[in-house]
Image (cartoon, helix red, strand yellow):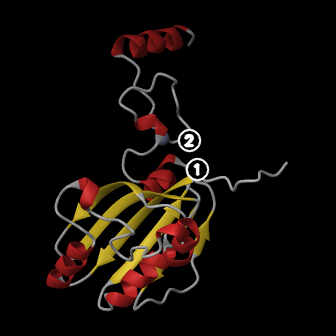
Amino acid sequence: MTSAFPISVPVHNKLTVIAEASYMQRIQKQLGHSGTASQVFSLSSIISNPHESLQTEWRMKHWGVAYEVENVRVELALTTRWIIRFASRDQGPTKALATLSRKYREATFRNITYGNDGSGSSTSFLCGLSPAPNYWGPSTSHKEFQSVAGEDSCDCNYMINPRGLYPYIDCNRPEISTDQALDEFEKSSSLV
Ligand SMILES: [Zn+2]
């Protein structure tokens, strides 16, 4: 069955910007970087829509996605290397990033876009140009998933994990208590 409306799925993005320090400041200033998470990065700070009536079409054409990004957070802020994460709809905002890259030609931009299973794609931008993206499939291990989604991103890492979610074989399972370990040791020893 097909829906009359396209289904919009949130996806995750990790954007890495590499630039010389003063150049980086210019980029961050345009993007609205002011130290507060909500003003760090937005697609409308790259290119804003002059035609309010054509929202979705305009956004798809100029941003590559139908909606503004959400849940922006800074993962790393060094003078020459900046990493932010944000959510977008269905795909990465590659058209907006190409525009940004065309404007800041001395910087390198790399964006990875991935779903909840860790599968995704990576696109690099330099002077507005991007080679074909690299694609990869769903993660098969905790280590692989977190290399894409970030530290402590796996379900097993939740402070409280009431459902006992350990999606991968190498997930961090809770350690058993010393008493339980001794008990099990004694049981196995008595069998010898
Ligand atoms: Zn895990």
Which numbered dot is residue 178?
none
Amino acid type indicated by mark 2: Tyr
Residue tagged 1:
117
Foreground of the two, 158 or 15: 15
Residue 103: x %, y % from top left = 34, 88
Residue 53: x %, y % from top left = 52, 68
- For the point 81% across and 52% down, which residue is it? 2
Secondary structure beneath label 1: loop
Is residue 125 positioned above or below 43 on the image?
below
Foreground of the two, 186 or 19: 19
Foreground of the two, 23 or 162: 23
Residue tagged 2:
168
Looking at this rendering, what residue extends furthest in the front direction? 53
Secondary structure beneath label 2: loop
User: Could you classify mark 1 by the number of other residues whose Cα lies within 10 Å: few (under 14), some (14-19), or many (20 or more)?
Assistant: some
- For the point 21% across and 79% down, which residue is it? 24
Query: In the figure, is residue 49 to the left or right of 45?
Result: right
Foreground of the two, 182 or 66: 66
- For the point 37% across and 16% down, which residue is it? 177
Query: In the figure, is residue 13 to the left or right of 115?
Result: left
Whole-number angstrom distance, CA of label 2 to CA of label 1: 11 Å
Number of marks drawn: 2
Q: Quadrant of residue 133?
A: bottom right
- Quarter of the figure with the C terminus: top right
Q: Is mark 2 within 8 Å of ligand 1?
A: yes
Could one spot residue 65 in this view of the protein? Answer: no
Amino acid type indicated by mark 1: Asp
